[in-house]
Structure formats: structure tokens, C-alpha cells
Amino acid sequence: MRATFGLSRLLRTQLRHMCQKSRAQSVAVLGVPFSKGQKRRGVEHGPKVIRDTGLIDRLSGLDYFVHDLGDLNFHHFEKDEPYMGVRFPRTVGAANQMLSGAVSSAVGDGHTLVVLGGDHSMGIGSVGGHALQCPDLCLIWVDAHADINTPGTSPTGNLHGQPVSFMLKELQDKTQGIPGFSWFKPFLSSRDLVYIGLRDVDYGEHQILKNLGIQYFTMRDVDRLGIQRVMEVTFDHLLARKQRPIHLSFDIDAFDPSLAPATGTPVNGGLTYREGIYITEEIHNTGLLSVMDLVEVNPTLGASRRAVESTAALAVDVIASSLGQTREGSHMPIEIPSTKVDTEQLCL
């Protein structure tokens, strides 16, 4: 096992140096102001508040050409009755179909893509559209929740708690026939997925994780192993066989609510700032990040303006560190004025 870790670390170091020489210069930002995957209104304002907190300027400051693709426009089907307990299936399905096309187009144009949510039901279209261009992708899902309920196991019927089940080939018999999703086919194998930060997993989800042998790290695992080891195991699991594009889907509720209070389903005991940023720094260092989602910022749920601002600022930090912002300080050369120093005085 130690030899495997060493090989993986060597490959990542080589990739990091290659990436620094041929770093993708183009980043696109796409807003997904969508809220029908869950019950709380306000999450559709997430893209705006993240942009307003300085996202575009921050990315431009990292020497990227930034293309703001604006927001997708969605409509709600008037007759959208629940099916198998699933709420708004046609609306969520149509929205994800539109998103899938937009993501596929942006990736096909050569952009590294940042997708701003919106609720996490949009993961279906975001990862699905990415897979149209990069069928061998792997998925890192950073979240307090597994979001792998099926229509048959979901206690709420909310599709923001089910997107991963729609993606997995092993669960395709559990999601067939849902209105609005006739366009969609599962594309991901369970071995191509890793969860980080779990701490609120439903019984049915736990059974799925165990039965499919999915690699996941709860917050207890993060405490026990440390975030560095978690990332080593993650990359060995996903990249040891071959280097391939990474899709990062990051729910802001992965962080502890003390850091990200303006979100719909907060759970105590989440990631610290340092742990969350370490995750994204390490993903950037692989040179393989192709698309990332940042979801579930809900500015209407903050108890104060400061709570909203801190949550949005954290979202910007996560995105920026995924794209190369470091905690090592400025690397720009500084001209130091010449001064004569009395060396004898220094030696006294």
C-alpha cells in the first residue's frame, strides 16, 4: 500500500509540473438558478450572490481568460405531478437536459467550467453533460449528504437528494420511467466515484453505498485519517489505473454551518476551512480538474447579512483554490531597494 501511495504521489507531482507549463488559460462560468430539486426557495439566487462577491475578478486575477456565460433560464411545468413520490420530475428533468447541453458545449469549446447552483439536483445535468465530452471522467462529491437516494428510498421525494443514483449504471433499474428523464442514460460506474465529508446519510443510501462498494469518507474518517490521507486514498482510488478528467461537485454544506450558515440543509460537525481548501488545492494540483459545481448557497436563509456574505465568500474561495489560488502568498517578484549593511554590527 505504501508503494502505491508513493507511485500516485510521483504521478501527481509530474502532472503538476506539466500543468504549470501548459495550464488551461480559459475558464467559463455558468449560472444555474434552479430550486425545484428541494422545498426551500432562495437557492436560485446562489449564482448571483457568488458573482457579486467577486468571483469573476478573483478568477481573472489568477491569469485566466474568464468567460461568464450568464445564467440558464428555466420554466416550471404547470402540470408536474409527483411520480413515485418524486417532486417536480418534469421540471427537474427538463432543466437538467438544458444544463447537460450547455456543459457539453462549454467543455467541447476547451473551457475549464465552473457551474454555480442552484440546488444539487443540477448535478445530473452537469456531470452528465461533462460525460458527453469526457466519458472516462471520475467524480469527487464533497457533501454532508450522499445524494444517492433512489425514488424508492427517498424519504422526501426531493431530487436534490437523488442525483447520484440517476448517474450510476448499477442503479439504472431504480430510476427508469421517471417523467422528464427519457433523454438521460446512466453513465457512471460506482468505482468512478468518491465521497468526502459525509455525515447525514439515510438508511437506504447507506445500504447502496455498502452494496456497491462505493469509496466514501465520513467526517469521522476525516478526523481519524486526516485530510491529507483522505486525498491520497481518493486519488489512488480514482487515478491509479489511468489519469482522467475530474468532475468536482462541491456542496457548500460540506463545511461546518459555523462557516457556511446560508444553506438549506446544514449539518453540524462539517469540514473546517483548512480541510475544505486543502481538498480543492490537491484537486487542482493533479492538473486534471475539468468541471466543478458549487451548489446550495441560499442567501435567503442567512440569519444576517454577514452570514450570507461569509457563505458566499467561502464559495468564492473554494472555486478560486480549485483553479490555482494558493495559501503560500504572492509569487510575484518584488524589487528590494539596495541598502548598505554594517556586517560588523550584525556579527556583534
Image: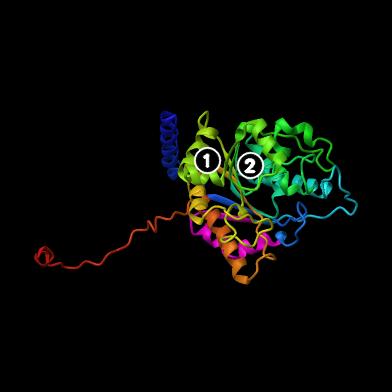
Whether residue 249 sits left or right of residue 95 in the image: it is left
Residue 147 versus residue 19: which sits nearer the camera? 147
Amino acid at circle 2? Gly
Q: In this view, does 114 lie above or below 108?
A: below
Is residue 189 visible in the rendered image? The answer is no
Q: Mark 1 points at which residue?
A: 288
Out of 49 and 310, give the one closest to the viewer: 310
At numbered mark 2, what does the secondary structure look like: helix, strand or loop?
Answer: helix
Residue 60 covered by magenta stretch: yes
* Residue 121 picture location, percent across and down: 72, 48
Residue receiving disc 2: 108
**Quarter of image, res 307:** bottom right
Q: Name which residue lies at 72% across and 62% down.
A: 42
The residue lying at 52 percent from left, 60 percent from top is 58
Q: Nearer the viewer, residue 12 or 148?
A: 148
Q: Give the vertical position of 331 relative to 198 (above or below).
A: below
Mark 2 vs mark 1: give the one in front: 1
Disc 1 marks a residue whose amino acid type is Leu
Residue 211: x percent and y percent?
A: 67, 31
Instruction: Give how far across and how far down residue 279 sits, in percent.
Output: 51, 47
In the rendered structure, which disc, 2 or 1, sits on the residue that comes first in sequence? 2
Range covered by the magenta-colored residues: 45-68
